[in-house]
């Protein structure tokens, strides 16, 4: 029965083609009218890419993701301090020393670092410097007659603190492990 239906469609096509070609003169068309009943064309993979369309309207924000393992926190550095404030939810991650590039050297970072006192180098890392920008410890330099003269030439301390009630990110220079 399916074969009979296909044969009927084919015979209608042939009849339609011959009537179309007679009404259009000597023009012969492809199978089908307006491409509807014709042989399927190429899939477009070999053609040129079209122009990009306009940028669409932004969609609504997605759902909030799940909370992290410990719910978040904020990390900050207390320069010149060895402790963190005694506030609920605040704890010290590590106590360190301030360091940075020497003021006459070029190519170093603009910001100070709070280096951990227990440096831990990766087994495959090298500490060779080859005269590139170096990191120097920061010391207090105070003119004579100034307050805090007892701190002259002492390392400037720092403390990295964490407040667990805020979101957090931290980069600890001088080590590849988390405390």
Image (cartoon, rainbow, N blue to C red):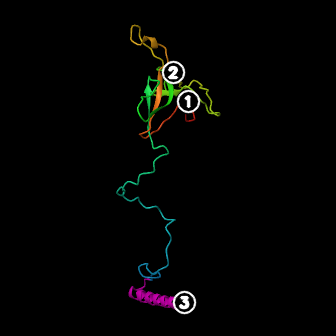
- The secondary structure that dominates the magenta segment is helix
Nearest the eye: 152 or 165: 165
The vertical placement of 130 against 33, above or below, is above
Where does the image place residue 66, in percent across and percent down from the top left? Answer: 45, 50
State yes or no: residue 150 in magenta.
no
Residue 22 locus on image (x, y percent): 41, 89
For the residue pair 72 and 39, the one nearer the viewer reads as 72
Residue on which disc 2 sits: 137
> Residue 24's spot in the image, x, y percent?
39, 85
Q: Is residue 1 visible?
A: yes
**Can you identify the residue that label 1 sits on?**
174
Furthest residue toward top: 145
Q: Earlier in the sequence, mark 2 or mark 3?
A: 3
Magenta residue span = 1-27
Q: Residue at x 51, y 90 (%)?
A: 7
The mark nearer the N terminus, 1 or 2, is 2
User: 95 or 7: nearer the eye?
Assistant: 95
Residue located 52% across and 24% down the image? 135
Q: CA distance from mark 2 to mark 3?
A: 90 Å
From the viewer's side, name the closer residue of 128 and 47: 128
Q: Point out which mark residue 3 bears.
A: 3
SS for dot 1:
loop
Residue farthest along the left direction in this orientation: 57
């Amino acid at each position: 029965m399916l074969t009979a239906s296909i044969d009927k469609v084919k015979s209608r096509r042939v009849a339609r083609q011959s009537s179309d070609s007679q009404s259009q003169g000597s023009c012969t068309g492809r199978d089908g009218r307006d491409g509807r009943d014709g042989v399927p064309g190429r899939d477009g993979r070999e053609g040129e890419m079209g122009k990009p369309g306009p940028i669409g309207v932004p969609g609504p924000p997605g759902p909030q993701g799940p909370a992290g393992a410990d719910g978040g926190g904020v990390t900050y550095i207390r320069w010149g301090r060895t402790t963190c404030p005694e506030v609920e939810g605040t704890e010290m991650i590590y106590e360190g020393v301030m360091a940075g590039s020497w003021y006459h050297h070029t190519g170093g970072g603009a910001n100070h670092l709070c280096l951990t006192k227990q440096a831990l180098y990766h087994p495959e890392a090298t500490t060779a410097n080859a005269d590139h920008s170096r990191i120097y410890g920061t010391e207090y330099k105070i003119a004579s007659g100034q307050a805090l003269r007892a701190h002259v030439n002492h390392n400037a301390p720092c403390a990295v603190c964490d407040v667990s009630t805020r979101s957090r990110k931290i980069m600890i220079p001088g080590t590849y492990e988390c405390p």
